[in-house]
């Protein structure tokens, strides 16, 4: 009796195990993701250029002290002009008193790294000829004038100004800005380069040199 009972129990366990295995085998495998969808999922989102100062701007990095760095590109009369600079915020400071440009200092025309200009065509900035190439831009009070400084040294930090590399000092036209600009913005048009910062708006004529 005991042997028969064990025999039937063993048969029942084997049958149950076989049924479970059959169910698992019949369960459909997950469908693979189509190749195009997989590539789309893995592709990182790309940022769209924004308009800034008349040009197309892309953020380079967020800056060391909250002054985002941008590269702005302009197409002016078949010339490709690009400026990379840090954009500080005023944050209730006063230009010339608690924030640059100060009366006795050369200003990097931005924040952190030196502001960089790249042009693939020769430029005339007022009466100064600036050949195609890469430069850094600076600004300073010079006696009764406010000057844009074009310098041939590149790749340096914004406090490492070396006057021996100056290409040109160019007087800018300065006006009061109301309301004040809380964030620095450089701009380029078909006939003007300028910036707005605090209560200060400065500009200088610019043309493509033939």
Image: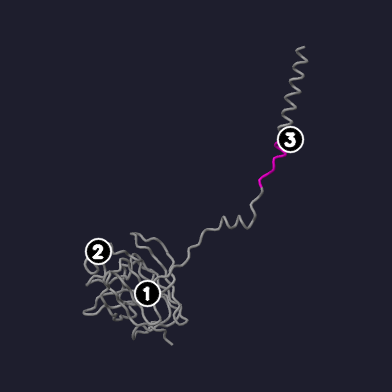
Residue at the bottom extreme?
210
Task: Give SS at disc 3.
Answer: helix
Image position of 95 (left or right of 154):
left
Which residue is the site of mark 2? 93
Q: Residue at x 34, y 84 (%)?
A: 126
- Taking the magenta stretch, the answer to whether it contains residue 25 is yes
Q: Who comes first in sequence, dot 3 or dot 2? A: 3
Residue 187 is labelled as 1
Mark 3 neighbour class, 10 Å CA radius: few under 14, some 14 to 19, many 20 or more: few
Quadrant of the image containing the N terminus = top right
**Circle 2 Cα neighbour tier, 10 Å, few/some/many (<14 / 14–19 / ≥20):** few
Distance from label 3 to label 1 (Cα)? Answer: 73 Å
Magenta span of residues: 22-30
- Relative height, residue 146 to residue 94 (above, below): below
Q: Residue furthest front?
A: 179
Q: CA distance from mark 2 to mark 1?
A: 22 Å
- Mark sitting on residue 22: 3
Task: Label 1: state its secondary structure.
Answer: strand
Q: Quadrant of residue 62?
A: bottom left
Residue 161: within the magenta?
no
Instruction: Tell me whether circle 3 and circle 1 mark residues in contact (CB < 8 Å).
Output: no
Marks 3 and 2, how far apart at CA: 77 Å
| Colour scheme of the rendered structure | one colour
Q: Residues within 10 Å of mark 1 (few under 14, many from 20)?
A: some
């Amino acid at each position: 009796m005991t042997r028969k009972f064990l025999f039937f129990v063993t048969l029942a366990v084997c049958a149950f195990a076989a049924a479970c295995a059959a169910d698992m085998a019949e369960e459909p495998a997950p469908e693979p993701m189509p190749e195009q969808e997989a590539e789309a999922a893995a592709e990182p989102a790309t940022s769209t250029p924004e308009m800034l100062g008349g040009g197309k701007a892309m953020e380079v990095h967020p800056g060391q002290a909250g002054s985002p760095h941008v590269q702005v590109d302009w197409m002016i009369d078949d010339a490709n002009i690009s400026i990379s600079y840090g954009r500080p915020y005023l944050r209730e400071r006063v230009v010339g008193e608690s924030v640059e440009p100060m009366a006795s200092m050369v200003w990097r025309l931005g924040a952190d790294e030196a502001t960089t200009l790249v042009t693939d065509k020769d430029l005339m900035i007022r009466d100064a000829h600036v050949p195609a190439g890469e430069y850094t831009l600076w600004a300073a009070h010079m006696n009764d004038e406010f000057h844009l400084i074009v310098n041939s040294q590149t790749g340096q930090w914004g406090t490492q100004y070396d006057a021996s590399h100056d290409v040109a000092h160019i007087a800018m036209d300065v006006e009061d800005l109301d309301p004040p600009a809380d964030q620095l913005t450089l701009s380029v048009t078909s006939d003007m380069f300028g910036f707005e910062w605090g209560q200060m708006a400065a500009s200088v004529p610019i043309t493509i040199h033939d």
